[in-house]
């Protein structure tokens, strides 16, 4: 029985992994196949006969994919930076200081978790038009920051409550400013939580089609997801190009994920007050 | 010169009054221990002195200077915490140096102070290590070192030994006492452990429910407590209280320490032994008396008495303390 349980657990996990990775796998293999081969045998591996780089060639020729990559990267990294910075600061204030309306403020900030930001799309668009931010990356960065903050504040304030009061007080007695206590003592100790928040927010931002389509559809600010849409037409879709673009879109997000999850593991295994 | 003066210090959290009108003067070089049951306000009082909490009313002066409203770092104090509170990402050396560096002290002085503290506490081999690589006792020494380095006017200790095991606690207790003799600094030490209080203090401050019950030298408090609470709090096993002894008036309570009871045929205290603790040097008996009041007896050396034995004890009236119904001492 005792031997069986881990085996069963691993079986369940493996099944899940296969199911989760299968679509990615299908995208990857088909991106290296000729169009006919994609439709004839979608699950077959590319062989000498069906192997083709035509999709990647189309992507490289059509549009400015390097620019799209860059835009997606800027938006994702900047949004994550702001979410983590402002989220952590708000969380610190909520968890560390006693002030009137503390609980209400916490609830107000958490409310955003329950209300989808897309409901406000029209209002957001109007606002962006009035402030002249339409078709800028700032429009996206601001919206994604707003979208990510509630969950970030919620998760981080819980973690920050767990940071030893003695440690913060020791810092105060040693003459550290509240900012120094935040940046030098508290942030390093909640690094695993920061990484969690980053991972949670990164993927929806990177993959989002909605806001880029509405707020920043211009050529020079297109994100990768939006850029890939040129290959999807109403009547004809260039599947080679779509699959190739998607395959390439996975790479950067994977790199970011590895970076953050490293932090996650390191945060868990090091440190500790006692 | 007084190291610390507290005048009518009160502290409330919302409607809860945690400290009520505390008055206390600590002389230069004194070792003061705050002791009391949990929730008595002793840690809060220490935090008010440190400046981590502001007093709701009253005045706190350190070294003759009023410090209300002055941040902890500029009060000339250093604090040692129960959880050590070392900076996990800094080496032992940097942990100890941080306070002085923040003060803007010249590098040479920082290095000199750190070296001095490390020598005093035998921390020299560990200067380059991080807290995670040290044992509990070593971490506590680093925390003490961090306090020494700053050369404070007043040391504050917040239950520094509670996280150590018994043997280490005894060693560290001796080290802290030695440190006090070497540095001749004023120290305030919070604990709930009466042994630490008795062995370390020049004067003990006994607190209950946010009030000072009594202040005095350990033996004065032990021999001459002001009330029933102090009498019962200090000493282990704690003092026996009798209400139904022949000769006591109604409402009067008689207090006798367990070591002042001596076996005596036909003594005033008769009963049956319910429990025996043999400590080698001492033997403690718990007795259920025939009058219905349990009491403890401390016999020196080893004693053959067993559970279930019928025993009789008596005491010198001069050794007994009398309290009134409200617990106040009657002299």
Image: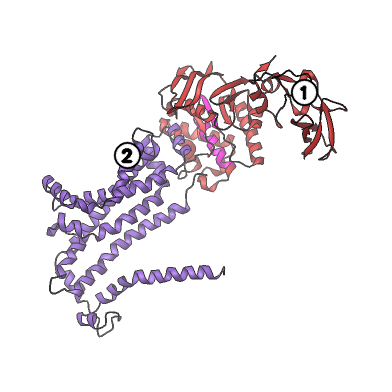
Chain colours: A purple, B red
Residue B92 percent coordinates (x, y): 51, 41
Q: CA distance from mark 1 to mark 2?
A: 62 Å
Task: Identify whether A80 is placed above or below B207.
Answer: below
Magenta-tinted stretch: B137-160
User: Which image quadrant for residue B37?
Assistant: top right
Could one spot residue A42 in this view of the protein? yes
Classify mark 1: helix, strand or loop.
loop
Question: For residue B138: magenta?
Answer: yes
| Up/down of A216 relative to B214, above or below | below
| Foreground tag (1 vs 2) | 1
Horizontally, is A43 left or right of B153 in the view? Answer: left
Tell me the residue that label 2 is attached to. Answer: A105
Q: Is residue A24 above or below residue B16?
A: below
For residue B249: magenta?
no
Q: Quadrant of residue B26?
A: top right
- Residue A104, numbered label: none
Residue B184 position in % (x across, y down): 59, 24
Crowding at mark 1 (Cα within 10 Å: few <14, some 14-19, many 20+):
some
Toward the viewer: A3 or B73?
A: A3
The answer to whether residue B107 is visible is no
**Neighbour tally class for label 2: few under 14, some 14-19, many 20 plus, Cα within 10 Å:** few
Question: Which mark is on residue B245?
Answer: 1
Residue A62 lies, with reference to residue A204, above or below; the image says below
Callouts 1 and 2 on one subunit: no
Q: Secondary structure at mark 2?
A: helix
What residue sits 63% from the left and 42% below the top?
B165
Q: Is residue B108 left or right of residue A63?
A: right
Chain identity of mark 1: B
Is residue A4 left or right of B257 when viewed as pictured? Answer: left
């Amino acid at each position: 029985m005792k031997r069986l349980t881990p085996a069963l657990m691993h079986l369940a996990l493996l099944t899940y992994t296969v199911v989760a990775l299968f679509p990615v796998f299908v995208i990857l293999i088909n991106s290296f196949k000729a169009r006919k081969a994609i439709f004839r045998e979608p699950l077959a591996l590319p062989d000498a006969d069906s192997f083709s780089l035509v999709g990647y060639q189309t992507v490289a020729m059509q549009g400015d994919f390097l620019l799209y990559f860059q835009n997606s990267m800027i938006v994702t990294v900047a949004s994550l930076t702001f979410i983590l910075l402002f989220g952590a600061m708000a969380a610190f204030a909520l968890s560390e200081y006693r002030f009137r309306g503390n609980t209400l403020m916490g609830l107000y900030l958490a409310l955003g978790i329950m209300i989808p930001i897309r409901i406000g799309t029209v209002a957001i668009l109007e606002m962006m038009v009035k402030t002249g931010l339409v078709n800028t990356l700032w429009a996206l960065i601001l919206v994604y920051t707003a979208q990510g903050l509630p969950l970030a504040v919620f998760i981080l304030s819980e973690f920050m409550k767990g940071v030893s009061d003695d440690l913060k007080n020791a810092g105060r007695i040693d003459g550290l400013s509240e900012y120094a206590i935040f940046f030098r003592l508290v942030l390093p100790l909640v690094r695993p939580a920061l990484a969690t928040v980053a991972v949670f927010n990164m993927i929806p931002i990177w993959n989002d089609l909605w806001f880029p389509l509405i707020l920043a559809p211009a050529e020079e600010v297109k994100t990768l997801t939006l850029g890939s849409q040129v290959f999807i037409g109403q009547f004809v879709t260039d599947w080679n190009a779509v699959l190739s673009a998607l395959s390439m879109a996975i790479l950067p997000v994977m790199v970011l994920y590895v970076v953050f999850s490293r932090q996650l593991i390191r945060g868990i295994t090091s440190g500790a007050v006692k | 010169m007084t190291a610390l003066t507290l005048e009518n210090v009160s502290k409330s959290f919302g409607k809860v009054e945690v400290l009520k009108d505390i008055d206390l003067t600590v002389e230069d070089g004194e070792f003061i221990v705050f002791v009391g049951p949990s929730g008595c306000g002793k840690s809060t009082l220490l935090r008010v002195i440190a400046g981590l909490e502001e007093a709701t009313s009253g005045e706190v002066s350190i070294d003759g200077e009023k410090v209300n409203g002055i941040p902890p770092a500029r009060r000339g104090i250093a604090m040692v915490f129960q959880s050590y509170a070392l900076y996990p990402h800094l080496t032992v050396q940097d942990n100890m140096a941080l306070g002085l560096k923040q003060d803007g002290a010249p590098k040479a002085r920082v290095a000199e102070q750190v070296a001095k503290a490390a020598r005093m506490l035998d921390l020299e081999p560990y200067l380059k290590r991080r807290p995670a690589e040290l044992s509990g006792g070593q971490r506590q020494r680093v925390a003490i070192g961090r306090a020494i380095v700053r050369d404070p006017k007043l040391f504050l200790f917040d239950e520094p030994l509670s996280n150590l095991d018994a043997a280490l606690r005894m060693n560290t207790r001796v080290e802290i006492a030695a440190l006090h003799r070497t540095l001749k600094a004023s120290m305030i030490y919070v604990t709930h452990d009466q042994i630490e209080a008795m062995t370390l203090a020049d004067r003990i401050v006994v607190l209950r429910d946010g009030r000072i019950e009594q202040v005095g030298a350990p033996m004065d408090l032990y021999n001459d407590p002001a009330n029933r609470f102090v009498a019962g709090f200090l000493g282990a096993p704690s003092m026996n209280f009798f209400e139904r002894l022949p000769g006591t008036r109604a409402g009067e309570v008689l207090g006798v320490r367990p070591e002042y009871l001596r076996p005596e045929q036909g003594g005033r205290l008769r009963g049956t032994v319910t429990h025996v603790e043999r400590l080698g040097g001492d033997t403690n008996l718990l007795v259920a008396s025939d009058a219905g009041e349990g009491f403890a007896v401390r016999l020196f050396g080893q004693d053959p008495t067993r559970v279930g034995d019928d025993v009789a004890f008596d005491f010198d009236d001069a050794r007994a303390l009398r309290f009134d119904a409200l617990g106040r001492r009657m002299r």
